[in-house]
Image: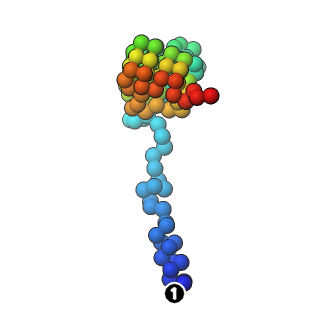
């Protein structure tokens, strides 16, 4: 009957508990990301490479000009590592990514 069909459809489209309760995006292990604007850490003014080097728990922005002119946040988990890895990129948050030469070169800067 129509009433049973509607009830069945409602049950089929109910979101699962796992999708309704998900972890917020962020760095693994509770590490704080390094927030950069045009290649410099917001707040301290030091370049993002030096800010990454200063973290005791991880590293990021490793490589020649890896985070030069980078805007966004990068986790100290090896992200943005490689020659020009995040050069001139604009990425909200990099988590365990952008590794390798020119991996995320100018990403997010398409106008």
Q: Residue at x 57, y 19 (%)?
A: 38
Q: Which residue is mark 1?
A: 1
Q: Position of residue 72 (x, y in %)?
A: 54, 27
Regarding residue 107, the answer to whether it shows in the image is yes
Q: Quadrant of the C terminus?
A: top right
Regarding residue 36, the answer to whether it shows in the image is no
Left/right of residue 73 with respect to residue 95 in the rendered view:
right
Instruction: Say which quarter of the image contains residue 76.
Output: top left
As helix, strand or loop, the secondary structure at mark 1 comes to loop
Instruction: Say which quarter of the image contains residue 42.
Output: top right
Q: Position of residue 79 (x, y in %)?
A: 41, 26
Q: Residue at x 54, y 84 (%)?
A: 2
Q: Residue at x 44, y 61 (%)?
A: 16
Above or below residue 21? Residue 109 is: above
Give the color scheme: rainbow, by chain, secondary structure or one colour.
rainbow
As rendered, which of 24 and 79 lies closer to the eye?
79
**Residue located farthest toward the bottom when viewing the structure as drawn:** 1
Instruction: Say which quarter of the image contains residue 44.
Output: top right
Q: Residues within 10 Å of mark 1 (few under 14, many from 20)?
A: few
Q: Position of residue 14 (x, y in %)?
A: 49, 66
As rendered, which of 16 and 21 lies closer to the eye?
16
Above or below residue 102? Residue 19 is: below
Q: Position of residue 35 (x, y in %)?
A: 53, 25
Above or below residue 34? Residue 11 is: below
**Residue located farthest toward the front when viewing the structure as drawn:** 110
């Amino acid at each position: 009957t129509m009433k049973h069909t509607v009830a069945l459809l409602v049950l089929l489209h109910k979101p699962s508990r796992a999708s309704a309760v998900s972890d917020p995006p962020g760095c693994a292990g509770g590490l704080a990301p390094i927030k950069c604007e045009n290649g410099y850490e917001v707040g301290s003014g030091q370049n993002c490479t030096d800010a990454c080097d200063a973290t005791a728990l991880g590293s990021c922005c490793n490589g020649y000009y890896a985070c030069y002119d980078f805007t966004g946040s990068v986790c100290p988990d090896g992200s943005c590592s490689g020659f020009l890895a995040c050069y001139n990129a604009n990425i909200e948050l990099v988590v365990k990514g952008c590794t390798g030469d020119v991996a995320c070169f100018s990403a997010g800067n398409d106008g």
